[in-house]
Amino acid sequence: MPPHIALGISQMRKDAPVTYTLNLALQGGGAHGAYTWGALDRLLDEKDITFDSITATSAGAMNAAMLVTGLARGGRQGAKDLLAEFWHRITETAAGPRSPFAMFALPPDPATLNAFYENSPVYKMGEWAMRNFSPYQLNPMNLNPLRDLLTDLIDFDEICQGNGPKMFVNATNVRKGRGRIFTGREITADAILASACLPSLFQAVEIDGEDYWDGGYMGNPAIYPLIYGAECRDVLIVHINPIIREETPRTAADITNRINELSFNASLMREMRAVTFVQGLLDDGVIPEGKWKRLRIHSVRDDETMRAFGVATKSTPDWSVLTKLHDAGRTSMGEWLATHKEKIGVSDSVDIKADFL
């Protein structure tokens, strides 16, 4: 090829707009999923970022469904609007105590909000009831206001028809003790409710003769569907459950909260160990490049904020809490984009060994 033509092509490539493609991995965590709402809200501002696939669990699956439906209906702004509508309506449908802080333009800090809910008589009574009675006793009619909300807001045909990001929703098979990934036409309101079915709060969700509980027990979120079902190699994990706590919990509430965090992070830690193992084999030439997929891992998290919120606020979607979490998610995503966006398609932006192992 003549040098002047090669130079011209090179310049055209240099001047062409860059598009970044990501897979999303969205953790579950009840009302704390508003943090992911904020992170996605900020990510949707980036017009040069597109999405290949989304793997999600529990509240992460609900956020993912709103994102995919919104994109199909109205593009980026449609996704932002539907996510906002979902979280606004969550506050209207949920039961539980309400803080007096919603009237303030600037709600108090997370620790103050958490202390209010943790010491609420209504919350304590609910905790006592869940320790002594099952949802089959407390809710024999198996009422779940989330079902109506999901069917009202989500167009499952738009999710499944394949024109937008591919979705993978994880739930736990109660009888078999293993994860089940729902994708394509398998994704229904039941599949998402199964992914978010905490067994102390809700009756197991039956699908095709099998009962399912929250997917967080087996994958929060499950990473392996992206290895086999996605073209893109870049995986952006949006964390809800803090990985590190500097102090050992001493109170009963803090111990319960930390057990919750550890159990719902355990599966992700195992998968990150597997990712690191495969990358090591590729780096050492034990297996040839291309035989196994080399994932590039990215991570958005705010352990400091999420440590301040305890398990009490996961089940209490008060607008004061959701606003704080949304703002924290937007800030975290903005910081990640400013620092690491150029690494998409190039390299990891997180030290997997240091952060996960």
Image (cartoon, rainbow, N blue to C red):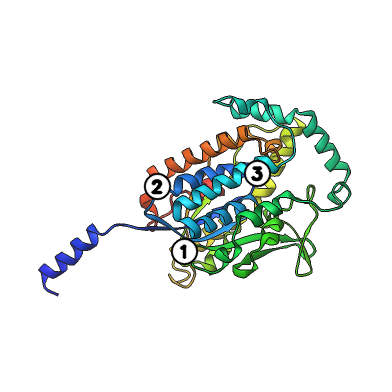
Badge nearest the viewer, 2 or 1: 2
Inspect the image, locate mark 1, and give the three-letter code of the amino acid beneath it: Arg
Q: Identify the disc placed on residue 294.
A: 1
Residue under the image location 73 percent in, 49 percent down: 145
The vertical placement of 354 against 5, above or below, is above
- Mark 1: which secondary structure? loop
Please state which of residues 332 and 191 is positioned toward the viewer in this rendering.
191
| Amino acid type indicated by mark 2 | His
The reply to whether residue 241 is visible in this rendering is no
Q: Which amino acid, mark 3?
A: Ile
Q: How far apart are the alpha carbons under marks 2 and 1?
A: 19 Å
For marks 1 and 3, give the one nearer the viewer.
3
Q: Quadrant of residue 204?
A: bottom right
Which is nearer the eye, 266 or 38?
38
The span from disc 2 to disc 3 (Cα, nearest Å) is 32 Å
Query: Mark number for residue 90?
Result: 3
Q: Name the residue beneath numbered marker 2.
A: 340
- Please name the residue shown 67% across and 25% down the image: 100
Q: CA–CA distance between discs 1 and 3?
A: 38 Å
Q: Nearer the viewer, residue 71 or 23?
A: 71
